[in-house]
């Protein structure tokens, strides 16, 4: 592996990871499959959106790969690094979301990205997080154990740092509540140089399926009521609010002129908003708010 930034290594890995994620989730669903498009951009970039809709167990799944080449970094990418504003760049990214049909199976999101301005200005970012509706504590612990295992070879402090970063980022400040139960998040990452940073990104990428697949396999066939389905749709509204009001990735996609169908493919296919709704005290719905939607040390507090 090269010690200097090499975007071809990154794009090759992201494309291969996209294929493996789509193949695995197609097996999980057992009925529908992912679309496949290859889109070339005038600047020489390449995108490969893949979307599964109306599956047996997955209502919407999107696994998007992009390699962007631009004349100037969009504000969403340069606001933390204003000295890079206006400079030409390349960016590679893979972003994925799974919205299961069963309300007992959580929504999951992951993305990995690499920005290259020049040999001295590059960074990785990404992570993954889990958004349950009717949580099972064992699932949340498994999720965080897998995240810890992905980070541990690179230092004991990596997981707690990325977990805290995730808790801080996936937070709906206008609701004063977390989006879900967290996971990993990192940005502007260059620690150890390109080779070490890329190995960390690959470790996180390889942990995505081991983190999520056992959970959805365990929960996808559980019986549920219409009331439980409606609560899932209500909580999906929070997901939509985060993507549209807060998420930097959505803003980046819009600002960079990416195909809007690809940018918004991560949105849930159905969601509802209820005015001033509150769960009944002691209910499973209240349990989500009372016990899960706040930062916790899931691996210590078992």
Image: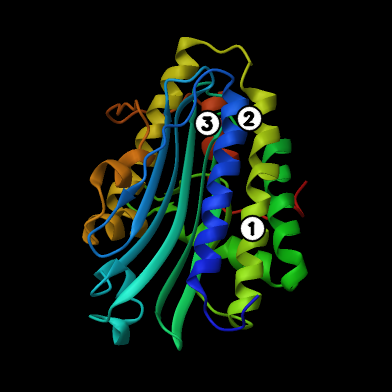
Distance from disc 3 to disc 1, alpha carbons, whole Å, reads: 24 Å
The reply, left or right, for residue 271 in relation to residue 112 is left
Q: Distance between the residues labelled 2 and 1?
A: 19 Å
Going from N to C along the chain, the mark reached first, 2 or 1, is 1
Whichever of callouts 3 and 2 sits on the residue coming sooner in the sequence is 3
Q: Name the residue under label 2.
A: 216
| Residue located 67% across and 70% down the image | 158
Mark 3 or 1, which is nearer the eye? 1
Rate crowding at label 3 as few (under 14), some (14 to 19) or many (20 or more) other CA atoms within 10 Å: many
Q: In which quarter of the image is the N terminus?
A: bottom right
Secondary structure category for the residue under label 3: loop
For disc 2, the neighbor class at 10 Å (few under 14, some 14 to 19, many from 20) is: many
Residue 224 in the image: x percent, y percent?
56, 13
Circle 3 is placed at which residue position? 133
Q: Residue at x 77, y 68 (%)?
A: 153
The mark nearer the N terminus, 3 or 1, is 3
Callout 1: SS: helix
- How much space separates mark 3 and mark 2, taking CA atoms? 13 Å
- Judge whether residue 186 can be spotted in this image: no
Q: Mark 1 points at which residue?
A: 204
Query: Eyeballing the image, is 200 above or below 145?
Result: below
- Quarter of the rendering containing residue 152: bottom right
Question: Of discs 3 and 2, which sits in the foreground?
Answer: 2
């Amino acid at each position: 592996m090269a010690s200097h930034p090499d975007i071809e290594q990154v794009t090759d890995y992201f494309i291969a990871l996209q294929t493996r994620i789509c193949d695995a989730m197609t097996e999980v669903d057992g009925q529908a499959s992912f679309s496949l498009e290859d889109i070339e951009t005038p600047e020489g970039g390449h995108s490969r959106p893949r979307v599964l809709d109306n599956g047996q167990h997955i209502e919407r799944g999107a696994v998007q790969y992009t390699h962007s080449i631009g004349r100037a970094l969009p504000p969403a990418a340069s606001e933390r690094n204003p000295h890079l504003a206006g400079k030409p760049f390349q960016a590679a990214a893979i972003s994925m979301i799974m919205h299961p049909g069963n309300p007992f199976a959580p929504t999951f999101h992951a993305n990995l990205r690499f920005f290259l301005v020049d040999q001295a200005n590059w960074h990785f970012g990404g992570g993954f997080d889990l958004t349950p509706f009717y949580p099972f504590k064992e699932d949340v612990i498994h999720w965080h154990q897998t995240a810890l295992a992905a980070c541990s070879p690179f230092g004991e402090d990596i997981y707690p740092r990325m977990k805290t970063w995730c808790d801080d980022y996936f937070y709906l400040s206008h609701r004063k509540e977390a989006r879900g139960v967290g996971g990993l998040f990192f940005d502007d990452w260059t620690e150890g140089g390109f080779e070490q940073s890329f190995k960390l990104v690959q470790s996180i990428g390889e942990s995505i399926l081991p983190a999520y697949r056992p959970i959805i396999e365990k929960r996808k066939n559980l019986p549920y009521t219409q009331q439980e389905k409606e609560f899932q749709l209500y909580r999906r509204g929070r997901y939509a609010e985060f993507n549209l009001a807060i998420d930097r990735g959505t803003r980046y996609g819009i600002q960079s002129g990416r195909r809007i169908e690809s940018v918004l493919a991560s949105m849930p296919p159905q969601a509802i908003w209820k005015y001033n709704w509150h769960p009944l005290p002691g209910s499973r719905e209240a349990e989500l708010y009372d016990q899960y939607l706040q930062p916790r040390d899931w691996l210590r507090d078992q």
